[in-house]
Amino acid sequence: MFRQSKRRVAGRRNFDERSGSSSGNFILNGTASEEEKKLYESLYQSRLSFYTIPPKGEITLEQFELWAIDRLKVLLEIESCIQRNKPAREMELIVKPLLQKLLPLTTDDLEIRKKDYYSHFILRLCFCRSKELRDKFVRSETTLLKLRFNMLTSQDQAKFVKTLNLPFLQFISDEEKEQLSTELYQTISGALQFQLNLTDENQRRQYFNQEKFIKLPFESVVDLVGNRQVFIKKGSAYLPQFQQLNHIANEFSSMLSTALLKTSQNIPRLNEDDRLLPILHHLSSGYDASNFVLQDQFGNASQGEVTATSVYSAKIEENFPLCAKNMMNGLKTVHHLRYQARQQLTFFLKGIGMSVDDAMQFWSDAFAKGGITTEKFNKEYKYNFRHNYGLEGNRINYKPWDCRTILSKPRPSRGEFHGCPYRDWNVDKLTLELSQGMKLTQTQVNSVLDNVERTEYTVACTKVFEMTHGGSTNVEINDQTHISHPNLYYERSRQLQKKAEGAAT
Amino acid sequence: MATQTLPPGNGPSATDMQYYYQHLYPFKSVFQWLNHSPKPGRDMMHRELAMAFRSGAYKRYNSFDSVQEFKAQIQRSNPDRFEIGAVYNKPPRQMDSLLKADMKPLEKEVVFDIDMDDYDAHRTCCSGANVCSKCWKFISLAMKIINVALEEDFGYTDYIWIFSGRRGAHCWVTDRRARQLNDIQRRSVLDYMNVVRDRNIDKRQNLKRPYHPHLMRSLEILKPFFVEIILREQNPWQDDAVAFNGLLSGLHDKVLIEILKKHWTKNSNRTSEQKWQDIDNLAATQIKHTSPLKKSDYFNRLRECKEDLVMATLYPKLDVEVTKQTIHLLKAPFCIHPATGSVCVPITEAFTPSDAPKLIKLQNELESNENKVERTSLQPFLHQFQQFVNQVVKKELSGAKREREEEAVNDF
């Protein structure tokens, strides 16, 4: 049954595209013709669109750039919220005002819809180039869709869902619900409490009794499977109606990533147009700002400064974020690091400018103290480190891990030192380090622990950076950049240090 | 130099391996299993196999078109062990002449890997590479939990557990629907299964309440074993330092923790079972509550902490990297573990590591019974595996047939 319906969807998708291109030559002038009105009426039946048909009309170059920038601003804010692990509710509070200003979809105004529609497709062009950009774009566009969906009235929501014509949106019978009621209630009562704010048990029961459940293959709602927010039985997931958005969002993101891949294959054909490419380049580079700055600095400014021995000096080491310090301490005490920490630390050190030769020296010296002979090192570890520098195997020039990557890796078990200490250490150990190791005051420690409690680990790290680098009294710090990369922590700290050195001499 | 990496005396020699591949290894069954059909097809011809050699060399991207070729190549190369990877869109052996981007992994069995290492925090009977029938119970129990979840929740029926040869077990889920999962879906299935993500024993689990039905069911299965395995046999918390770190850190109330600490410092060396009792006893006698409601709330929280501790000690601890990616390679069934000489045989929950035949024993058996494989102690395992393969092949055939019929109906 499952495979068959899947084929049906694919069929429908193709049909959509064909119908799109056959009725393709609408809107050739900028004025709102009847035809154009009709088109947007069908695209935005419920103030929200799945962007299935590409635009074919004409817009000015200025509109092209301005619309794209406005949408980009919204997406950047969303991305930053994702980076900070903001819960959905908070994200809505942050993004909503921006959305109202830049991309409102609250009225049926044609121009507003046009802007939303075009800006989406312009940004597709910008971000289809690399896998990283594509993934990021899909992630933030999907989040945007979710945010907007939640802002709709339930009437509009229902209307929107209906227009999508998604497969598997069939409800289970009352008998089936009755049979599984214990399990179903157990599964969703947490979500009822925290997502829908039903604090009272009776309220939740009542809501549950009214709620309809959709039965669909668990593969279609994998993210809910992953965090066990949905009940599954014999391969079918039982999705409460209030969570159908997840299903919709999944469909949207898989549709979008397929479309982006296609766009990227077609982009060489765009090359002849020299008006658009500079704009596209400019836009996409801004999106990846933090990575970009870092990459420029790798291997330039800090070349030769970090060597196998100087890395132990206070001058270098005091700029390390806690995660790097933790791994260095682990290495110093046990004279060995397990795989994940080896990866995390080599990439970090590579990022701050340690050359491959120095890296070999550094690791073999450190391991030698633990009784690992040069022969054993060469046999079992050398390849790994050379691989990290892109000298073996696939020859990929790996980038240092950002906080997102680090947080997505398996957590350290006993005797392992990788990961993010703000997440992985227990409160006592963290408190000790913050108060004694970093000499923070009790209030400062508490405020960091607050963020840790709310799982905002990068915010905690940023705070620690600010507190240990002169806090609000230091003018340089006040740019409030969010630290989402250990190397960013190092670079900023090192620059401040250099400034201070310069001032002292 | 080659022998340096092996513990002296245990591992089989290169000649032993040659002998094993020639006379004993069930190439045909393994081929059929990976191929899902007796007739060679894409599922095997485009399947990556990797060989690991004594010298430490590792050769990836081998693929074989027939059972004969499979056997001949393995025999000729005589690897220490070989591993199974994904089915690709093109035969992996063409790798050198293809762009890397053109090689796409399509399918692979969903695999789970459990290793005894991850249980070391609560294992006292053995340590390191050693296992005994006592600590193998951790693995048996993990199999039980995973089996129920695979069948009840995901609806998978064709899966088999393979002894890893020393101190772990691999689960291969061969159902077509499982094979077709992409990396994101694999990760989600893994996350669903992998409940105890944080392996630091000094951190409280604090699992969400109410438990998801999968956790609820797992807890009910684990509870009776907790007393037997953890409290009585392994008894990890008799060591006061371990109890302070690993047991007390799991409780929610600082006051109670202090009281227990004092009590156990005064009466040191109490057994795990006594300490487990002390928690309830001291909580009942030493903690004052302002109202009955608060009191019942408090004991609810305490019970939840204890439930989390049961999960933390006994819930299957998975090696996550193995499951996450379609392309991940995992040692093939019936390989010989290079250090122990044990055969990686199919197992059930009743298995203990001493049941696994060792190569040297099989060699002796063969020599004394005129080379009849059927009379060796490997035979029951070969039979078990072939039964499984037959089931897989049959399912695949009927699945393909059903699909053709559906298509015909659709066309009509």
Image (cartoon, coloured by chain):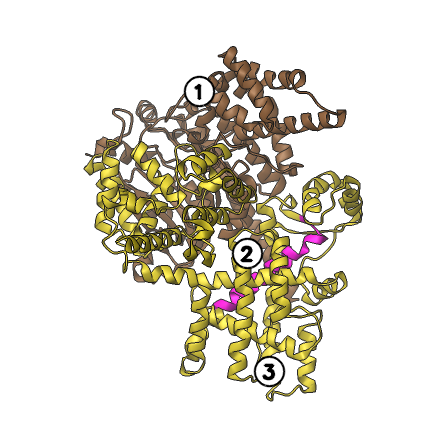
Chain colours: A yellow, B brown
- Residue A90 is left or right of residue B36, and the answer is right
Front-most of A340 and A292? A292
Three-letter residue code for mark 1: Thr
Pointer 3 residue? A24
Pointer 2 residue? A81
Tell me if residue A258 is in the magenta stretch: yes
Tell me if residue A456 is in the magenta stretch: no
Residue A192 horizontal/vertical position (percent): 71, 46
Residue B313 horizontal/vertical position (percent): 52, 28
Label 3 CA crowd tier, 10 Å (few <14, some 14–19, many 20+): some
Q: Are marks 2 and 1 on the same chain?
A: no
The circle drawn on residue A407 is none
The answer to whether the residue labelled 3 contacts the one labelled 2, judged by CB atoms less than 8 Å apart, is no
Front-most of B263 and B56? B263
The residue sitting at 65% across, 36% down in the picture is: B211
Residue A51 horizontal/vertical position (percent): 60, 71
Label 2 to label 1, Cα distance in Å? 45 Å
Pointer 1 residue? B124
Three-letter residue code for mark 2: Cys
The answer to whether any part of residue B181 appears in the image is no
Query: Numbered disc 3: what chain?
Result: A
* The C terminus of chain A, quarter of image: bottom left
Label 1 to label 3, Cα distance in Å? 72 Å
Prevailing secondary structure class for the magenta stretch in the rendered image = helix
- Residue A7 is left or right of residue A157, and the answer is left
Three-letter residue code for mark 3: Gly
Q: Secondary structure at mark 3?
A: loop
